[in-house]
Image (cartoon, grey):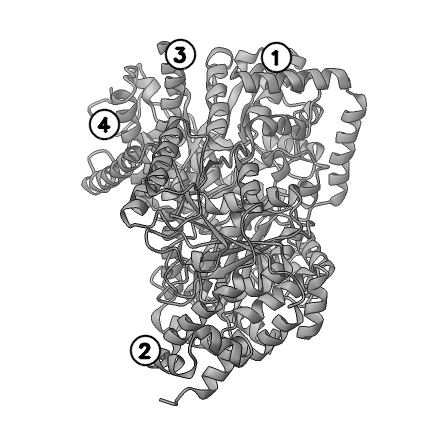
Amino acid sequence: MTDAGAVAAARQGDKRAIARLVTVFEDLRPSAAPRRSAIAAALADRPIGRVVGVTGAPGVGKSTLVGAVATALVAAGEPRVAVVAVDPSSPLTGGALLGDRTRVRFPSDDARLYFRSQASGGQAGGVAAATHQVCRVLARLFSTVLVETVGVGQGEIDVVRIADATWLVVQPHGGDAVQFLKAGLMEVPDGFVVSKGDLGAAVGATVGALVAAVGLLGGARPVLTTSAVTGAGVAALAAAIATGPRGGLAAKEPYFFERWVGEEYGRAGLRRLAALAPSTAAYLAAAGGLDAAHAAFAAGAPAW
Amino acid sequence: MSSPSEPYLLVDAAGQPTRDAPWIFRTYAGHSSPRASNALYRDGLERGQTGLSIAFDLPTQCGYSSDAAIAGPEVGKVGVPINSLDDFHVLFDGIPLEQMNTSMTINGTAMWLLALYVALARERGVPEASLRGTIQNDIVKEYLARGTYIFPPEHSLRLIAETYEYCVDHLPEWNPSNVCSYHLQEAGATPVQEVGFALATAVGLLDLVRARGRIDVAAFGRCVGRLSFFVNSGIRFVEELCKMRAFAELWDQLTRDRYGITSAKLRRFRYGVQVNSLGLTEAQPENNAWRILLETLGVTLSRKARCRALQLPAWNEAMSLPRPWDQQWALRLQQILAYETDLLEYPDLFDGNPVIAAKTEAIVAGARAELEQIVAMGGVQAAVDAGYMKQALVRSMTDRMTRIGSGAQVVVGVNQWTDGLPSPLTTGADGGMFQLDPAFVDEALAGLAATRRRRDPARVAATLAALAAAARAGDNLMEPSIACALARVTTGEWADALRAVFGEYRAVTGVDGQVLDLGAARAAELRARVEAFVARRGRRPRLVIGKPGLDGHSNGAEVIAVAARQAGWDVVYAGIRLTPDAIAVSAVEEDADLIGMSILSGSHLALTEQLVAALAARGGADIPVVIGGIVPKPDVAALEAMGVRAVFTPSDFELGQVVERMLDVVDGARP
């Protein structure tokens, strides 16, 4: 299957073709940039979908919740929903065990839903280096893309750099909210979900603590309660997501380009980038887009 | 009292020399249809078997009728399909219930099968109180190792507690559950883990029955006395003997100290055994006969810790279901041990032996620490939820595989003395293996259809509604289940009614955070090949691994997943109890380089055919497939003819080699 053929089939919802395109965007070698560029151009006529981050500590029930929300979104009329679930890679072997599929089961014949596992590739922060890339193609094919991060601790919510809106999931008695508050990160998520809402009195206490903390920081951000057991609250969360912001993905490209330069070429690379253009956004525009910029910067990088 | 001159003799209450009655001789059996299995049981009883041990097929175990979509390839495979009370009438035809001691290996649907047995007794006019036997009814190890759970833990445990509450009044000689350490050993548990986890399970169960407060103190004492265990016996028979003594000692202490049971009789550790299948080999399978004999010694030699019932696997169990002759051969071993040898003429042979005492004490101490750890975590349920036991088991299993792979643990015919002469036992026309007759499966389906035609639909609907109402109200579900049985409700209908109230459970996996030692040089070599793949393709090789069908023995799939990750693959673990179509969807969505399916139920041909068709329908026909499981040799060729690229059987114990062959497939598939 050629990339052009895959694009045509993916527009019709062919999952094999979609999966192949995702694989192209997971390939971060500069040599793959022309393929990405061509695919991105071929899909540029389509609107950019909403990218929603779902993050939280390990074991709070992110996978189960994301599966339920995706199903609820399409049931409520959302045209097409993709899930990207990130799991950690082993720092020793580079390999990864991606187990989120065991907790998410979509009806196998529902063409509106797509699930993709992704290894973190040793990146800290809860998402992979390729997560942003993969969202670029999925957001052109799906009206909503849910990104479930690695179970992270405090200070690791890089998904906000990709997503139009990010939800932090905490469980009753988890103490997570307190940790996030201490770390000064309560300002970061756009909304909060207390999972396992069937656990009784602890739920109310956790919700109360969150509402108080959010109120203290000013602004009005939602605090919702869900239960995977009873399904309670899932539709409300889906409704909140479906009315949230969308389309901001392209604006994230300068950040990820700088991050890529920093990782590949260090401070010298970042100084070179600054010298080449007044701003990173300007450099991307001059190069002809993100992928072309990858190729151009890699080609022009001093050999060392 | 022994006579002073002959202190070694076993004497009766009157001081006369005597010999012990033997344990109950059982043969774990059942397949195809109720009629075929009935013939099997009658033959077994005629040959001198003294109890029945019923194997149910996976749909029955998982709460599906034979005509359910997911049941398809599994009907009658690993046991008998039971759809309704009509099937029980056929299954026990000509077998007097009042004289039987019947063991039923059934868990998720244990209450239902007990209800069918009671209903059968009522229709035959046999007094319920005369029924003797056991239902396995231990859900914890289903979550940990075996996988035939249906409902979430709290509801499953409620069903078990209610069988205790029913039996203590109505079936005083019935064991309402057999707490299993058997499957823990199969899953790789060490003796200490086996004893510790099983006792934690038993304590969790009795704590629950006591806390529910539905029965009085005297009845609770009788419940403690009726709790029995189902234990495994491995090849290290001296250690196994000490394990059994440790079990008995700890149980005596626990029931006295935790539950205040004063009667020594009610504190007695009662257990049945199936000796170890894990160590049986497909290579030189005749050697398994000796292994089974030696494993039997661990649970029979010490009178103080001797089993109450014993079932032996057949020598060819690593290859297929046993044939009637294979089962007879296994039964003869028990009869020779009990009646030809002098084993049953002596008191305990090991009391006072310092080696046995010290070894036993070491297991007692280790198991007690393990038990206390689990209690401190909030009990067995919390430990299951946290994945604590599952991870410990996967770790033990990967350690074992590592030792066998490195040769540190000798397995004769497998990693030592592998050149053997061809076995005449496997050169017959059937290859030494049992072949199912598919006509029997049609018979099971016809029986189900006939039941559906004959029964009174209004009575079926009314009894199912009453069952659901009792489930919601928190009432004991035994009587409503018996009413369902009498009305010819089917197994699937009973389970569905409760699924609607309780929901269904999805398990945690034990694969997270596990490390497997493939050997440093081997791992480096494999990783170098993986890195070459990465350089060529711009990503890691991607393996989608899952278990189709209802067979829940997930450890093999998990060990391969951990090994591949160790070699640098990205492994998407799709889980268990999947349809082949769901595995195809996962592989397509994940753009897999390879699909691994693990199948231990014997349904590999049908399930693989379904996977291949599903892949073709979803545009994934080019994704290569490998199969792992208990696959008889002739079927390997059949699988390869379907396009399967490699088949791994128990003889492929060297994990590095398995990963290497998977890399060969991936490297050859798409350059």
> Three-letter amino acid code at disc 2?
Arg
Q: State the residue position of label 1.
A: B126
> Three-letter amino acid code at disc 4?
Pro
Label 2, label 4: how far apart the Cα atoms are: 88 Å
Q: State the residue position of label 4.
A: B7
Label 3, label 1: how far apart the Cα atoms are: 24 Å
Considering depth in this image, is A110 or B41 the residue closer to the camera?
Answer: A110
Q: State the residue position of label 2.
A: A267
Residue B43 vertical placement versus A124 (above, below): above
Residue B485 seen from this side:
yes
Residue B517 figure quarter:
bottom left
Q: Are marks 3 and 1 on the same chain?
A: yes
Query: In x, y percent, where is residue A200?
Result: 41, 27
What subunit carries mark 1? B
Query: In x, y percent, where is residue B615?
Result: 69, 60
- In the rendered image, the quadrant that contains the C terminus of chain A is bottom left
Res. B556 mark: none
Q: Residue at x 55, y 51 (%)?
A: B316
What subunit carries mark 4? B
Query: In x, y percent, where is residue B23?
Result: 44, 29
What subunit carries mark 3? B
- Disc 2 is placed on an element classified as helix
Query: In x, y percent, where is residue B161?
Result: 46, 21
> Three-letter amino acid code at disc 1?
Val
> Between tags 1 and 2, which lies in front?
2
Q: State the residue position of label 3.
A: B219
Residue B213 figure quarter:
top left
- In the rendered image, the quadrant that contains the N terminus of chain A is bottom right
Q: Earlier in the sequence, mark 3 or mark 4?
A: 4
